[in-house]
Image (cartoon, helix red, strand yellow):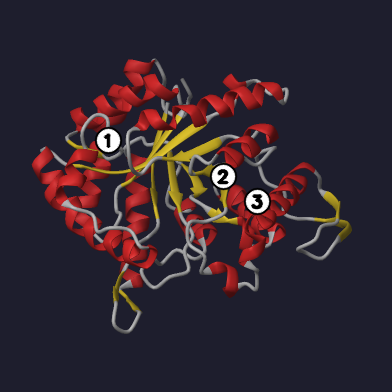
Amino acid sequence: MEIGIYSFVETRFDPLTGRQAGVEQRLAHLLEEIELADRVGLDVFGVGEHHRPDYASSTPAVILAAAAARTRRIRLTSAVTVLSSDDPVRVFQDFATLDQLSCGRAEIMAGRGSFIESFPLFGQDLDDYDELFQEKLELLLELREREVVTWQGKHRPSIDRRPVYPRPVQDPLPVWVAVGGTPPSVVRAATLGLPMALAIIGGEPERFRPAVDLYRATAERAGHDPEALPISINSHGFIAPTSEAATELAFPPFQETMGRIGRERGWPPPSRRQFEAEATLRGALFLGTPEQVVEKMLFQHRIFRHQRFLIQLTVGPMQHEDVLRAIELLGTEVAPVVRKELGSVRGGGT
């Protein structure tokens, strides 16, 4: 099983003025985190896309290109690219360039996005939310399939026999579809024969098993081998030498960030009791010692039989030294045990 990390590059900001602070330092720290993840043997690092003052990652491909120059083996993916509000031609060119710079380590994780700021920013109508993603995903797949493209759709000007460059090292360039578990999104990924990244950030993992079963059954009906289509489980968590330290370090930024987002969306504020409950074996948080995280990863693998696991270590701003320590523990104490138990090696599936 591949094991990795994803980040939205959260940054500190003044909630009264909405101004960001410390972006230069946060980006420098992120590159150090990716470099360490590569050095300790992790398989994947993902960078998300947001257009808000509390995040510094509006252009994942640019950040990942900087990381490509400082790493050797780790795969570099968006997590996610908000394809609905972007131009698929530019997305393909960005990641094909990243693939060349990284000698074939780039991936695209495409999604509709959990935030909506990018839609008005790039002139898209939220009423077309699902239709935009469907059409642009189809164009993205056409771009990776053919060097010279002819295409016509509703939400973008037509393309008439135009070549698109550069071409990536990998053929095809990996494209994953990120889903939150809704059946139409699962069916779309499976029907197209694309790997699925399933976000589990709350509740018992067993309740997501029907989504995985639906994905594999739909893929088989569509003529794809479900065993050849990777599934990634993406979740929040944090690792420290003791479970108490992990909780004390991770809860305050989690409470502030999820509480602020919750106020925007009408959610109740997160409580310490809920946080600790999610850290138990049947909760969504991968929080605690390396041994506890290993146990939870193996428990979920028995449920999903997935080929990749990505953890978001920094739900809110955290001390850089603590994050580096968590990455080191994930790479040196968690990943080797999980790989041994599942009979896999770095960079290989189960």
**Position of residue 339 measured from the top left corner of the image (x, y, whole percent):** 35, 22
Q: Are marks 3 and 2 in contact (CB under 8 Å)?
A: no
Residue 348, relative to residue 28: is it above or below? above
Q: Toward which corner of the image does residue 254 lie, by quadrant?
A: bottom left
In the rendered image, which residue does mark 3 sit on?
96
Amino acid type assigned to the residue bearing label 2 in the image: Glu
Q: Which badge, 3 or 2, is on the more N-terminal residue?
A: 3
Q: Residues within 10 Å of mark 3 (few under 14, many from 20)?
A: many
**Position of residue 55 measured from the top left corner of the image (x, y, whole percent):** 39, 66
Looking at the rendered structure, which numbered label has been put on residue 181? Answer: none
Residue at (61%, 22%) from the top-left corner? 217
In the rendered image, which residue does mark 1 sit on?
283
Q: Residue 223 or 27: which is nearer the viewer?
A: 223
Give the farthest residue toward the bottom.
17
Q: Secondary structure at mark 3?
A: helix
Residue at (47%, 34%) from the top-left corner? 232
In three-dimensional space, the C-alpha distance between marks 3 and 2, rounded to whole angstroms, equals 9 Å
Q: Is residue 108 left or right of residue 269?
A: right
In the rendered image, which residue does mark 2 sit on?
107
Amino acid type assigned to the residue bearing label 3 in the image: Ala
Q: Residues within 10 Å of mark 1 (few under 14, many from 20)?
A: many
Q: Nearer the viewer, mark 3 or mark 1?
A: 1
Q: Nearer the viewer, mark 3 or mark 2?
A: 2
Q: Are marks 2 and 1 in contact (CB under 8 Å)?
A: no
Q: Secondary structure at mark 1?
A: loop
